[in-house]
């Protein structure tokens, strides 16, 4: 069974906010490429570990904060960004889906940091294949 127009509209609204929660992890991860590559090239394992831990923790903290805001204010966000004002069923379903999808974002910092660190040491393609 395929989704109707309401489900597509709900997904569109929710995915925009899921994408917003991705942005800090991607930005921190991209900067991790350079820093981890420099530490790896200098054979400085201590700085390499600090880079990996700091970028993961910072990404996770920022993403968790954004997800908490989206979870707490899901109904208000859904009400403000729905295409049809006054459609209470659509607003309620959008808030419900947004509250579920924020948990998806909590795993992004771990994967993004790992991929970008491997890319910094020159093994990015190999890690993606594995």
Image (spheres, rainbow, N blue to C red):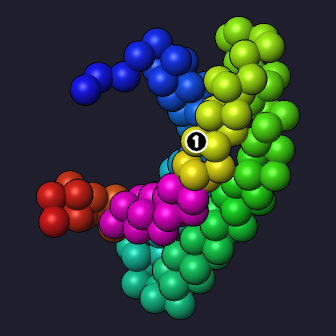
- Secondary-structure class at tag 1: helix
Q: Quarter-wise, where is residue 105 in the image?
A: bottom right
User: Which residue is disc 1 drawn over?
Assistant: 97
For the record, the magenta segment spans: 103-118
Residue 20 in the image, given as x and y percentages of width and height:
64, 38
| Residue at x 52%, y 76% (from the top left corner) | 52
Residue 94 visible in rendering: yes
The residue lying furthest to the top in this view is 84
Residue 38 visible in rendering: no
Q: Is residue 93 above or below residue 23?
A: above
Quarter of the figure that contains the C terminus: bottom left
Q: Is residue 39 above or below residue 6?
A: below
Disc 1 crowd, CA 10 A, few/some/many (<14, 14-19, 20+):
some
Count of residue discs: 1
Q: Is residue 105 magenta?
A: yes
Q: Is residue 2 left or right of residue 10?
A: left
Q: Is residue 105 left or right of residue 21?
A: left
Q: Is residue 127 magenta?
A: no
Q: Is residue 115 above or below residue 91?
A: below
| Residue at x 25%, y 26% (from the top left corner) | 1
The one of 99 and 27 positioned closer to us in this rendering? 99
């Amino acid at each position: 069974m395929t989704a109707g127009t309401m489900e597509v509209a709900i997904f569109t609204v929710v995915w925009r906010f899921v994408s917003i929660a991705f942005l800090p992890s991607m930005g921190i991860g991209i900067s991790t490429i350079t820093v981890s590559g420099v530490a790896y090239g200098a054979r400085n394992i201590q700085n390499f570990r600090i880079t990996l831990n700091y970028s993961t923790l910072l990404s996770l903290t920022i993403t968790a904060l954004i997800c908490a805001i989206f979870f707490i204010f899901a109904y208000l966000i859904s009400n403000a960004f729905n295409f049809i004002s006054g459609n209470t069923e659509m607003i309620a379903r959008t808030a419900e889906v947004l509250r579920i999808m924020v948990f998806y974002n909590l795993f992004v910092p771990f994967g993004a940091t790992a991929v970008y660190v491997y890319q910094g040491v020159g093994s990015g393609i190999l890690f993606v294949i594995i």
